[in-house]
């Protein structure tokens, strides 16, 4: 296994370099301060907070790029990606995280120049989102008042140490709903139940605009937040024990069995698709067997292990284009096993002695997974995984353990 460890270590060391060096330029356009539109290519990144600037090229084959910020452009959009609009004005500065709830009402604001993401747009209103290092902000404008206004939400402890939620955004949205959807009691109820979150507010915005998610996807591109997959593969597993059962010594060898899996990939940012949470279920078989024969004596011991696994993983595409991706993943495998066999037989002088349930084998056990793979044309996923030795016995006097190399071929249902 030393070559594998070297390969894994090399991948871990060079993957950040690939991530930093790789560009993700997509066709798009920017609107400069003077109002002119420039067509070109925008470098789309895994933005955890709204970008302060972007890299822009007028031609994809140009080596040099321009760095454009809020002092240079008022709007930018890559084809089939989110649009961003410049905003210069006030931002509420009070924290809204449950972990940092302040004591007393905080109405502090700051003035800043930022890019707001266009979260949802329709004939009546436009919803914007802005995320900084402190909180998530949401803004709204309408066709009669095009200047974005922040939707107000505050949470704090009062003098009695009780939590107070000020849901000013509900009144703001309700006034817009009355303006464009009069006498809509169902919409009013939806607003009163809506949390101050991206998906909830996008849903309200769609209702005020009388539009659908399908229409939004046509505008932004059909970039799914989750993709299901299924596939087949091979499991090369080596089962070993702390001491042979019927032999003076034993040299376990890897045995090859089929493996099937299915699951879902959930993208941290569907626009870039670099960071992924994978939930995977799999089934495979492992076997262990000892045999010996000496003169008139012979013996054997064996068991079969049938295992269903639930395998949450964190994946990262360190090379990431639409047609070809290279990724690494790490996770844990929570295993449920059933066993058959676990019996030994010993024959000598015409007499056979059979013993049953030799080892105390665990039904529930855990192992770790390290994986590297490629995705081709978004749909075909080829990966190699290594599972280091994991024990599935529950006694200190001996152990049985398994390690494996697995090859998988999956199809992603885009």
Image (tube, rainbow, N blue to C red):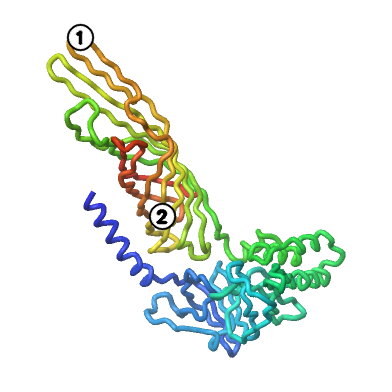
301 left or right, relative to 78: left
335 left or right, relative to 88: left
122 left or right, relative to 358: right
Residue hosting label 1: 350
Q: Camera-side residue: 290 or 125?
A: 290
Q: Going by the picture, which residue comes out furthest to the top?
A: 350
Task: Give the mark, 2 or 1, whose residue is nearer the N terminus.
Answer: 1
Q: Residue at x 75, y 81 (%)?
A: 145
Assess whether mark 1 and mark 2 are in contact (beta carbons under 8 angstroms).
no
383 to 234, vertically: above or below: below
Residue hosting label 2: 375
Q: Residue at x 76, y 64 (%)?
A: 191
330 left or right, relative to 101: left
Q: Camera-side residue: 135 or 128?
A: 135
Q: Camera-side residue: 348 or 172?
A: 348
Residue 212 picture location, percent across and down: 70, 60
Q: State which mark lies toward you, 2 or 1.
A: 1
């Amino acid at each position: 296994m030393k070559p594998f460890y070297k390969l894994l270590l090399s991948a871990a060391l060079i993957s950040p370099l690939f991530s930093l060096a790789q560009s993700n330029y997509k066709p798009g356009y920017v609107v400069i301060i003077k109002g002119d539109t420039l067509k070109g290519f925008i470098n789309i990144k895994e933005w955890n907070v709204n970008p302060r600037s972007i890299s822009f090229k007028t031609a994809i084959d140009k080596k040099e790029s321009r760095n454009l910020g809020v002092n240079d452009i008022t709007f930018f959009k890559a084809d089939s990606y989110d649009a961003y609009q410049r905003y210069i004005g006030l931002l509420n500065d009070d924290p809204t995280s449950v972990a940092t709830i302040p004591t007393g009402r905080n109405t502090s604001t700051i003035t800043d120049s930022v890019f707001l993401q266009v979260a949802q747009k329709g004939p009546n209103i436009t919803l914007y989102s802005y995320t900084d290092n402190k909180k998530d902000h949401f803004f709204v404008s309408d066709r009669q008042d095009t200047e974005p206004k922040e939707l107000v939400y505050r949470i704090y402890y009062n003098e009695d140490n009780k939590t107070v939620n000020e849901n000013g955004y509900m009144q703001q949205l309700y006034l817009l709903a009355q303006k464009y959807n009069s006498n809509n009691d169902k919409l009013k109820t939806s607003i009163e139940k809506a949390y101050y979150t991206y998906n909830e507010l996008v849903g309200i915005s769609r209702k005020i605009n009388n539009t659908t998610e399908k229409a939004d996807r046509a505008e932004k591109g059909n970039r799914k937040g989750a993709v299901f997959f299924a596939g087949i593969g091979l499991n090369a597993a080596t089962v070993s024990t702390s001491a042979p059962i019927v032999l003076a010594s034993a040299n376990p060898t890897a045995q090859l069995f089929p493996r099937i899996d299915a699951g879902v990939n959930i993208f941290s940012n569907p626009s870039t698709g670099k960071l992924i949470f994978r939930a995977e279920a799999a089934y495979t078989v492992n076997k262990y067997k000892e045999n010996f024969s000496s003169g008139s004596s012979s013996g054997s011991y064996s068991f079969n292990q049938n295992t269903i696994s639930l395998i949450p993983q964190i994946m990262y595409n360190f090379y990431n284009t639409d047609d070809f991706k290279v990724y690494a993943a790490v996770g844990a495998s929570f295993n449920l096993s059933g066993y058959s066999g676990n019996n030994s037989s010993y024959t000598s002088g015409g007499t056979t002695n059979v013993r049953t349930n030799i080892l105390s084998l665990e039904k529930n056990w855990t192992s770790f997974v390290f994986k590297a793979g490629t995705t081709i044309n978004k749909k075909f996923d080829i990966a190699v995984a290594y599972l280091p030795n994991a024990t599935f016995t529950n006694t200190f006097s001996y152990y049985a353990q398994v390690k494996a190399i697995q090859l998988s071929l999956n199809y992603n249902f885009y």
